[in-house]
Amino acid sequence: MPVEFVDLKAQLRAVRVPVNDRIQKVIDHGQFIMGPEVAEMEQRLAAFTGAKHCISVASGTEALLIALMALGIGRGDEVITTPFTFVATAETIALLGATPVFVDVEPDTCNIDSEKIEAAITSRTKAIMPVSLYGATADMDEINVLGAKHGVPVIEDAAQSFGAEYRSRKSCNVSSIGCTSFFPSKPLGCYGDGGAIFVSDDMLAETMREIRTHGQESRYYHTRIGVGGRMDTLQCAVILAKLDIFDWEIAERIRIGRAYRDMIAAIPGIRAPVVRNDRTCVWAQFTVQTDKRDAVIASLREVGVPTAIHYPIPLHKQPAYRSLCRVVGGVGVSESVSQRVLSLPMHPYLDEATMRTIVHALEKATKLL
Ligand SMILES: *Cc1c(COP(=O)(O)O)cnc(C)c1O
């Protein structure tokens, strides 16, 4: 049996009946756009996070874009974030004509270094966008204090951290706005594209709902520029079916992550991922660091263990972003971790035997070096 990087087939065995039932219901009622499952999912997810509003959208990227649009961010504005992330984080900022301002990450968690943010704040700063990379939040309270001090909202790019907790609060409800993704392999995934925005401000929520549907205030009456950014009813139905086992899956992710880390901690040359004590990680990626990445990848591949690199090139070095971003205070940590990170298979259905195979292959790889 080949080792799966994210085993969606194993998950399907646990949810097949409710998923089929939910999908069949949508096909029968026929309300494929903004059907009843959309509102039902939004209510359940808002309750899950504790945020007042959940606005479902077409993808995680769309969530970020609509959040920035609702804040009126555009040409001449700056948004502070990290270069060590998936491209969508900076892409949405740049799409609106604003400038992504990159500050460096912490070498162990790979999340934005909260102590380096204030030096990047200018009169043009319109938002701070920390990314909850790999499934755990950044130092949100420190970042929120900075946001409040300078009067700028904090948007959490929580595409990888839905279900994680920070000081007993749920990711997506730890700052002004939280944006997540339901891409199939994310911690809570649908069977296509999907995403959601979480916010407790009523005005912002209303603005986001309008932007989601072409800036329309009422039918065919458009008060602002919007997008076609709705999430399909069918995808919301899939999320609803999966939500019933989500708490269990999160607990499994945390249990497996702990066991994995304990096993890896003893391997010389491999640095296990770090999670701060005041938060949990839902392990969207289980990412180790090693100086001998190529050799480790090759030896894992030999025994059928897939790996991935999140991410090999920091965004300030990407051809499309080099000239339109601003870097503050140096981003040497982002550059060095991009050479060292390696993601291993991780999902709630990872069994003990497979984990041992992976850890054994890692041990062997490091001994061969
Ligand atoms: C996946 C991801 C996104 C984009 O989500 P999509 O649903 O794929 O559009 C944005 N930011 C980060 C950090 C992600 O991992």
Image (spheres, helix red, strand yellow):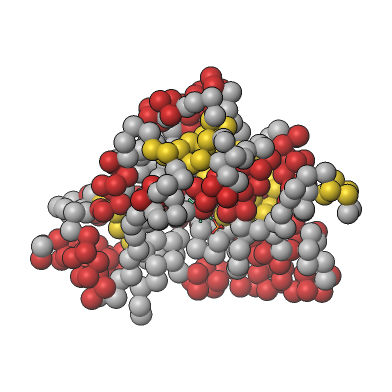
How many marks the image carries: the answer is 0
x and y percent of residue 79 in the render?
52, 37
x and y percent of residue 204 in the render?
72, 37
In the depicted view, which residue is nearer to us: 50 or 118? 118
Q: Name the image quarter holding residue 54.
A: top right
In the depicted view, which residue is nearer to us: 240 or 133? 133
**Residue sitting at the far left:** 368
Quadrant for the C terminus, please: bottom left
In the depicted view, which residue is nearer to us: 214 or 192? 214
Quadrant for the N terminus, please: bottom left
Give the left or right position of residue 148, taking residue 33 as reference: left
Q: Tell me if residue 364 comes above or below residue 312 in the rendering.
A: below
> Residue, x 44% and y 33% (percent of image)?
139
**Residue sitting at the far top:** 149
> Residue, x 71% and y 71% (percent of image)?
23
x and y percent of residue 319 in the render?
40, 55
> Residue, x 60% and y 67% (percent of image)?
192
Q: Tell me if residue 84 comes above or below residue 14 in the rendering.
A: above
Can residue 266 be seen from the camera position used here?
yes
x and y percent of residue 293 in the render?
22, 60
Can residue 166 be seen from the camera position used here?
no
> Residue, x 21% and y 54% (percent of image)?
290
Give the left or right position of residue 330, taking residue 197 as reference: left
Q: Name the image quarter holding residue 28.
A: bottom right
